[in-house]
Amino acid sequence: MAKAIGWEGVFPAVTTQFRSDFSLDLDATAKVLEGLIRDSVSGLIVCGTVGENTSLSRAEKVAVMETAKAISRGRVPVIAGVAEFTTAFACETAKEAARVGIDGIMVMPALVYSSKPHETAAHFRSVAKATDLPVMVYNNPPIYKNDVTPEILVSLADCETIVCFKDSSGDTRRFTDVKNMVGDRFVIFSGLDDVVVESVMLGAQGWVSGMSNAFPREGETLFRLAKAGRYDEAMPLYEWFMPLLHLDARPDLVQCIKLCEEIMGRGSSITRPPRLPLSNEERATVEAIMAKALKTRPALPEVGLKPAA
């Protein structure tokens, strides 16, 4: 049986930091992680899509996991993404995460191959059996081309280590479908920034957030307001946040999020090829969105966050 961790709140999909020559910068990554914990996020996810998992070598992935584990010091749970080309490689990465002492894993479908539903289910089941770590199933069909439908998820209900489902399809109806099929068997996480309030209304217990890298206190506040049903207070914040949250739904979300993070002084905008810098026009658009957001940045309602450092 998977060990229990706190599957609730905002878990930023943390960026991986690189130097100008694209080498891995663990010291800068550590500073990003520490800053997010300082600003009251509920958990951390490293080596996800925003963490440029598929641009990292196996040794680099392990190094990022080790850094996150060392920085967290048990203050928040640390989840590591598992994104590999084969089921065997994914199982190996899961075992490495367990060896490092990571608290759980977020497993993506096998990459590149467009699998049939029973193959998708078999991949998740095999990885879950390879470790005692709790597993979050990650569905992001626009990016990874394999759709983990409610039916596929329900077929995994007998696998005890699979405890959480992150959906980035944008189709919030799926949360209700899953609940109708298997009740509260899985903890549900919203995986797409610009539908988070709707997802919480439909039962999401957590949010894997991209834009919370740049605005962690705003993200955690928004989530807690929605979770408490304080929609009169949540909606003005959501409306302010929405132009930024839309950036999480773009194909170049990593470049957009890292640029926002850089503007906020929280990290670098450098991404590893094949992700190239935004064009001048695209960069100007993101900078304009940020300028407006910072000019109109709202005072945050009290939701129990520790005081800002």
Image (spheres, grey):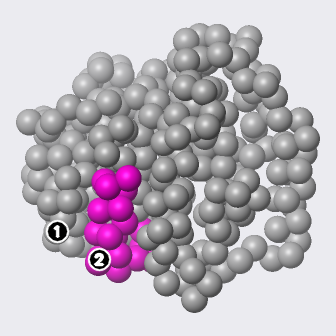
Majority secondary structure of the magenta segment? helix
Is residue 81 left or right of 128 when viewed as pictured? right
Q: Say which mark, if any, is on residue 58.
A: 2
Q: Judge whether residue 14 is colored magenta.
A: no
Q: Which residue is mark 1?
A: 92
Residue 46, percent from left and from top = 41, 57
Q: Is residue 6 visible to us here? A: yes
Compared with 289, 240 (above or below) is: above
Q: Who is closer to the viewer here, 113 or 42? A: 42
Would you say 284 lies left or right of 19 here?
right
Which residue is pictured at 71% across the width and 77% down the height? 277
Specify start and end residues of the magenta stretch as a single range. 52-71
The quadrant of the image that shows the C terminus is top right
As drawn, the residue found furthest toward the bottom would be: 21
Mark 1 touches mark 2? (CB < 8 Å): yes
Three-letter code, disc 2: Arg
The amino acid type of the residue labelled 1 equals: Glu
Q: Residue furthest front?
A: 309
Q: Secondary structure at mark 2?
A: helix
Query: Residue drawn 46% across and 78% down?
Result: 24
Specify whether residue 70 is painted magenta.
yes
Residue 108 in percent (x, y) is at 35, 57
Residue 210, how many percent across, how many down?
58, 50
The N terminus is located in which quarter? top left
Instruction: Using the image, tell me which numbered label, if any, was put on residue 223.
Output: none
Residue 295 appears left or right of 160 = right
Instruction: Name the residue: 82% across, 68% down.
Output: 283
Q: Is residue 113 visible?
A: no
Return the residue nearer the eye: 67 or 229: 67
